[in-house]
């Protein structure tokens, strides 16, 4: 009986050791699985992080590419339609150096091409695809001295300070000649600002008698003459 008891105890001890071994093996396997799952999760996080960085870099490069392709506004001026089929008159100096030209009719911004230019009179005729039945009529008579005039245009559009609505000033015809007795122009005292170039000068009947072209350079006059000229602006006769 004592031998049987020893045998039983040995068998029980061995069974307990086997259970412990199996339990340890199970725990070790679970730990390996946990570590493997953690490793896979870390790899997935790293993959997602790398993908996020790659997407951000792609978007940055795409934004840089588009910024290089996007036209840069180098000039802003005024103009007016002279036909019902998209013909626009402006100053030549307004479009000088521009690779693309955009006009802004009521229907929205649209590209325009240059049909003709006049270097002597600083004029440019553009053509865009839009319908505008509100084309301004040209006056059949010349401007007269002391005639009331109205200047329309879009000054200071590049600096984005004023509204995008058309601005009006009024005055009179001060002289029937421009600088240095240039009789292709006339002088007005209506206020003119940068961006008014190319805009219409109309009479009281609403007919175009000229195209705004320039004013005296106040900074230059102050430097060279010690005075600031006031209300001395010029238009090209229609």
Image (tube, grey):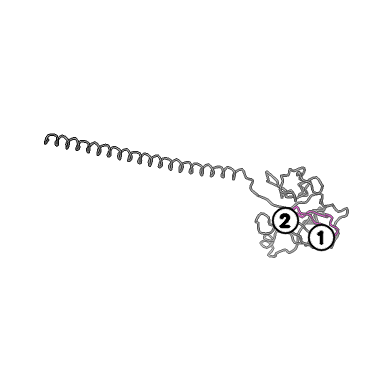
**39 relative position to 206: left or right:** left
Would you call the spot at circle 2 few (<14 residues within 10 Å), some (14-19), or many (20 or more)?
Answer: many
Could you tell me residue 57's position as x and y percent? 51, 43
Q: Which residue is mark 1?
A: 149
Q: Measured from the top left, where is residue 157 in percent x and y?
A: 68, 55
What secondary structure is found at the residue carrying circle 2? loop
> Is disc 1 placed on a helix, strand or loop?
strand
Magenta part of the protein: which range? 196-216
The reply to whether the magenta stretch includes residue 89 is no
Q: Position of residue 32 (x, y in %)?
A: 33, 39
- In the image, is residue 198 part of the stretch drawn in magenta? yes
* Cα–Cα gap, marks 2 and 1: 17 Å
Drawn side of residue 41 relative to residue 130, left or right: left
Question: Which residue in the rendered view is the most extreme toward the left?
Answer: 2
| Residue bearing mark 2 | 154
Task: Answer above or below: position of 73 versus 47.
Answer: below
Foreground pick, 211 / 28: 28
Nearer-N-terminus badge (2/1): 1
């Amino acid at each position: 009986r004592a031998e049987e008891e020893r045998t039983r105890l040995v068998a029980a001890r061995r069974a307990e050791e086997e259970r412990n071994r199996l339990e340890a093996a199970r725990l070790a396997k679970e730990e390996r699985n946990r570590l493997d799952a953690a490793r896979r999760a870390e790899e997935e996080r790293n993959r997602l992080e790398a993908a996020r960085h790659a997407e951000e870099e792609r978007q940055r490069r795409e934004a840089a590419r588009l910024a290089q392709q996007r036209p840069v506004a180098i000039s802003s001026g005024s103009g007016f339609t002279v036909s019902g089929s998209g013909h626009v008159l402006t100053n030549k100096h307004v479009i000088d150096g521009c690779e693309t030209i955009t006009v802004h009719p009521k229907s929205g911004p649209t590209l325009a091409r240059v049909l003709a230019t006049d270097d002597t009179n600083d004029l440019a005729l553009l053509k865009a695809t839009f319908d505008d039945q509100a084309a301004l009529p040209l006056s059949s008579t010349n401007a007269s001295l002391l005639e009331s005039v109205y200047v329309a245009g879009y000054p200071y559009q590049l600096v984005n300070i004023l509204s995008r609505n058309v601005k009006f000033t009024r005055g009179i015809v001060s002289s029937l000649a421009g600088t240095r007795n240039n009789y292709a122009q006339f002088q007005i005292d209506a206020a003119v600002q940068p961006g008014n170039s190319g805009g219409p000068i109309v009479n009281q009947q609403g007919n175009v008698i000229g195209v705004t072209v320039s004013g005296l350079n106040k900074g230059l006059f102050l430097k060279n003459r010690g005075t600031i000229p006031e209300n001395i602006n010029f238009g090209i006769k229609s």
